[in-house]
Image (spheres, rainbow, N blue to C red):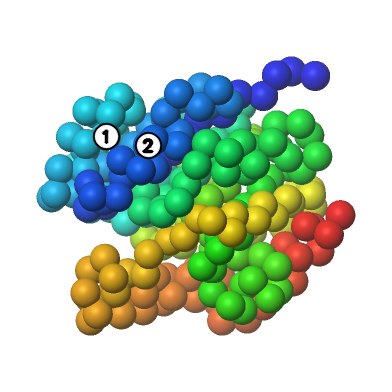
Amino acid sequence: MTPRSFTCLIPAFNEAARLPRVLDAVLGHPLLTRVVVIDDGSTDGTGEVAQARGAELITAPENLGKTRALLLGLRTVTTSHVVLIDADLLGLTPAAITALITPVGNGDAYTSVSLRGNAPWTWRQIGIDYISGERAFPMELIAGQLDELEHQRRFGFEVFLNALIVASGRPVSVVHWPEVASPAKSVKRGLWRGVRSDAAMLADIAGTIGVMGFVTQIRHLRNLSAH
């Protein structure tokens, strides 16, 4: 079996305060070949923080949104697999990264997805966070779809990826991260800006897969994670 290699992509917009803790968990990790931060038009020095810590840096010409920011990173990937990590995570450790990669690296699953300790109660009850930003997957899953990503909504990446995973019919590993949390947008950006940001994200998701697409994707992903 050909050894699997992993590139870590971290899209980041104005995450200079939180990014260092994430980079502490991934830089130098023995299962990661590359660590790349995509600075999505930040104004707070996020890119400078990434470079100072020793990560590779891709700088977007403006704020493109998560989908197109990730596309910039995906176009540079030469490893067999990709790991996606959000830039604002709290409590992330090298062990958590190992747990996310291992089921894919050893062939037990085709893809993996995190279930954070502070994921919404509903997601924890059903056993999967279908819009989690932390994934490991083979580059072959999305390599033929990069041009299509140019036309996707700003926050539609995860559900676009879900559709590819469901179509593959291959096993998904749900990796529980009880000690890892993602801060609410209202905490990071203030109440009303956070509410508007959450509303925009949900609108993009609904616009990508339709209202009933939520239910359909969750059902299929749960089935694949039960294999």
Does any portion of residue 4 appear in the rendered image? yes
Q: Position of residue 14 (x, y in %)?
A: 22, 52
Pointer 1 local density, CA inside 10 Å: few below 14, some 14–19, many at least 20: many
Along the horizontal axis of the image, is 52 left or right of 133?
A: left
Q: Secondary structure at mark 2?
A: helix
Of circles 2 and 1, which is in front?
A: 2
Tell me the quarter of the image containing the C terminus.
Answer: bottom right
Residue at the extreme top of the image, as rendered: 2
Tell me the quarter of the image containing the N terminus.
Answer: top right
Q: Give the amino acid at mark 1.
A: Ala
Q: Residues under labels 2 and 1: Cα distance?
A: 8 Å
Residue corresponding to mark 1: 50
Does any portion of residue 68 appear in the rendered image? no
* Image quadrant assignment for residue 125: bottom right
* Numbered circle sitting on residue 23: 2
Please report the residue visible at 76 percent of the width from the left and 31 percent of the height from the top: 106
Q: Position of residue 205 (x, y in %)?
A: 48, 70
Q: Secondary structure at mark 1?
A: helix
* Image quadrant assignment for residue 145: top right
Total number of numbered discs in the rendering: 2
Marked residue nearer the N-terminal end (2 or 1)? 2
Q: Position of residue 183 (x, y in %)?
A: 38, 64
* Numbered circle sitting on residue 202: none
Residue 68 in the image: above or below residue 190: above
State if disc 1 and disc 2 touch (CB < 8 Å): yes
Along the horizontal axis of the image, is 101 left or right of 198?
A: right
Is 35 in front, or is 161?
35
